[in-house]
Amino acid sequence: MTKKLKTSLLASGVTIALLGGCAQQGLVADDSYNRTKTGAVAGAIGGAIIGATTKGHNKGQRALIGALIGGAVGAGIGYSLDQQANAVARALGTGVSNDPLAELDPNREIIVTKTDSYVKITFRDSMMFAVNSATPRSSAQSKINKVGTVLQQYPQTIVQVAGFTDNTGSYSYNQSLSERRANSVARAFENAGASMVSAIGCSYNAPIAPNTTASNKSLNRRVEVYLYPNENAQINPCQQ
């Protein structure tokens, strides 16, 4: 690594620190800002490398500018995810949880989590639909409307809705049911004001608990909503 590039990366660290200082206001549900920090680091390093390797004079200066711009862009994306996670959690009357066991708690009907790449909302099937139905209950529709209202503030957010079942019945039946439920919730989000919404049915793939007991099966029957900042962040929920 050249001395100029090292200097530029050091400068990017200063940028991250400054951005971190700016991110200490406004959010109350979760003030860890992990997405902001990670986005700033990745953006700054990427910007510095691109700037230093671009042809032309003053590579050190270009690397510094690239680091500053990359850090700012990366932190901006991260902060947006933090903002969305907290705004969604407040709208749903809950908090943001990164407890890996949260989804295994049968007493939690709605779980909002966030990673470095996306925000995820998990809705329990019991509060979303009647048995074998793909029409959201009125209480569930109210929750969807609240999230849709929040997403109106983030028109660039990509929304993906994934439906999951337990393994009762055939795979094909559950595939159809999971697709119909995902599509139903996706349409409800669109009607509530969200844009760029897609849906996918996962049948009984990717269970969060073994389908060996009634309580476990109830955990596996769920709808997951993913909020992505861009297409590159998208995953396949059925293969987790």
Image (cartoon, helix red, strand yellow):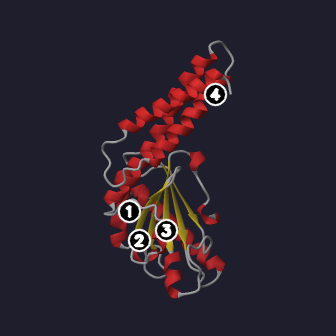
Disc number lying in front (3 or 4): 4
Q: CA distance from mark 3 to mark 1?
A: 11 Å
Residue density around tag 1, few if under 14, some if 14–19, many if 20 or more, within 10 Å: many
Question: Could you tell me which quadrant the C terminus lies in?
Answer: bottom right
Residue 156 % position (x, y): 46, 43
Q: Which residue is mark 2?
A: 136
In terms of sequence position, does the residue under pointer 1 or pointer 2 come before the other? 2
Q: Is residue 109 left or right of residue 218?
A: left
Residue 218 % position (x, y): 49, 80
Residue 166 % position (x, y): 56, 79
Decide if residue 73 is in sight here. yes
Q: Is residue 126 above or below residue 76?
A: below
Q: Which mark is drawn over residue 50?
A: 4
Q: Residue furthest bottom?
A: 213
Disc number lying in front (3 or 2): 3
Q: Which residue is mark 1?
A: 144
Circles 4 and 2 in contact, beta carbons < 8 Å: no
Q: Is residue 61 left or right of residue 146?
A: right
Amino acid type of the residue that numbered disc 3 sits on in the rendered structure? Val
Residue density around tag 2, few if under 14, some if 14–19, many if 20 or more, within 10 Å: some
In terms of sequence position, does the residue under pointer 3 or pointer 1 come before the other? 1
Q: Which residue is mark 3?
A: 223
